[in-house]
Amino acid sequence: MKAYRAAILYFTGPAQAHFESDGLLVVGPDTEARQRVEAVGSYQALAPRFANVPTEHFPGRIIAPGFVDMHIHYPQLDVIGSPADGLLPWLENYTFPEEKRFAAQDHSAQAAIFFIAELLRNGVTTALAFATSHVESVNALFTEAQKGSLRLMTGKCLMDQNAPDGVRDETEQSLIDTEALIQRWHGVDRLGYAITPRFVPSCSEAQLRGAGALAAKYPDVWIQSHVAENKDEIAWVRQLYPQARSYLSVYEQFGLLRPRAVYAHCIHIDDEDRTLMRATGTAAAVSPTSNLFLGSGFFDYEGAERVGFPYGLASDVGGGTSFSPFHTMLAAYYVGREGQAKPGLSLKPQALWWQHTAGAARALGLEGVVGNLQPGCEADFVVLNPQVTPLLARKTAQAVNLDELLFAMIVLGDDRLVEKTVISQASGS
């Protein structure tokens, strides 16, 4: 066992944070030799019970749950900030040429090392990530995540049509490769497989049908794709499936909507789509920095809350412009203020933080496993230094309640705020 003393933030319910100004977090190994939370609460209440447990003290710091990123592209490190008129030109001119490079094992491995380090540096301890259509890219990312004990889900990108040479795959072989990767990696240590059709235009009916069959055969793997991000993309799907009620319904047709299915963006959807997501347990990965950067539109928070389906926050690097959860939470706040049918929604700081931790974990089917510091959760956490910059120190010192403290960190924070990232038995900075 080991204990950590600091101010501690954790969640007692949806968007309901609890803050101990002088807290104690006690962790210990479980039957799998994985560190889990044994106890959390005030130092005064817990210290006598754990008096013999070695304790590390972080005065002036805040221990909080590790962040959960629901949608990120590890092969797109080098296309962050590339200028384009919108999603489809950005894919054609930057993304696909870059992803071709991941056929090389050495390049995939180098990118995976940088990617995992960047996640940890920004306090992200769980991620659902896209690889490329190359098996090499998947193996490289899983290998590096396993070294660092990161909880990570990824998968080979399926794209057998409407894609250039070098990233386009072959239908039958792509499904054979997917199943082999599931059998090799899913459930190993903290790794999980995600069946990954890139998006409807990139996948033939046969490939989507095969993906659905694999999803039925392996019900505990994840599914990830994109839906309703961009109006030109939606028009393209309408041409390909003129009889479909909506873009989202195409995935339903092939058995790709269910718990542990995560669709990035979900911007241009209606209440029937939202009801379908709720009924099937399908989740949305909200990617505000990407949506703002590419001019795709705004996630409808009011609609999501009114109908009630699972969602959480995501960086969507490289369409997204930062690995930092603080940048993502701030962009989500902007979307709430300006992007709703009735502008002026003010997303509360605890709700924003929930969306990037325990709420995202719930949407991924990992509630009670990651994203929180309640007893039984895996001991993934960050140590935050709210005095790391002069302005942040000045602002947080004036906070009179938890919302003011959290919002100051959301607005003024970045990777410098994360002093240390601790993952199970492994730690990095």
Image (spheres, grey):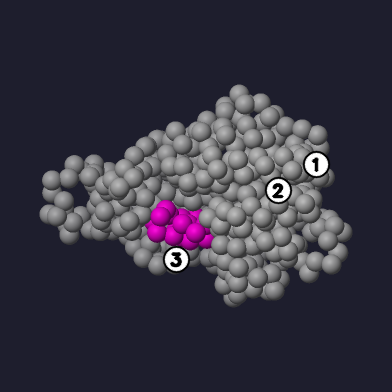
Residue 115 picture location, percent across and down: 54, 35
Q: Is residue 45 left or right of residue 253?
A: left
| Residue 370 in magenta stretch | yes
Nearer the camera: disc 3 or disc 1: 1
The residue type indicated by label 1 comes to Ala
Residue 129 picture location, percent across and down: 58, 45
Real-space CA distance between mark 2 and mark 1, rounded to the nearest whole angstrom = 10 Å
Q: Is residue 52 left or right of residue 350?
A: left
Q: Quarter of the image for the N terminus: give it.
A: top left
Residue identifier under label 2 = 198
Nearer the camera: disc 3 or disc 2: 2
Residue situated in front as seen by the camera: 347 or 163: 163
Real-space CA distance between mark 3 and mark 1, rounded to the nearest whole angstrom = 41 Å
| Residue 302 in magenta stretch | no
Q: Which residues are magenta?
A: 354-372
Real-space CA distance between mark 3 and mark 2, rounded to the nearest whole angstrom = 31 Å
* Label 3 vs 2, first from the N-terminus: 3
Determine the secondary structure under disc 2: loop
Is any atom of residue 86 visible in this view? Answer: no
Q: Is residue 370 left or right of residue 48?
A: right
Q: Is residue 69 left or right of residue 22?
A: right
* Label 3 vs 1, first from the N-terminus: 3
Residue situated in front as seen by the camera: 40 or 101: 101
Q: Quarter of the image for the C terminus: give it.
A: top left
Q: Residue 374, located in which quarter of the rendered image?
A: bottom left
Is any atom of residue 300 visible in this view? Answer: yes
Residue identifier under label 1 = 163
**Image vertical order of residue 297 relative to residue 130, above or below:** below
Residue 412 picture location, percent across and down: 48, 49
Disc assigned to residue 15: 3
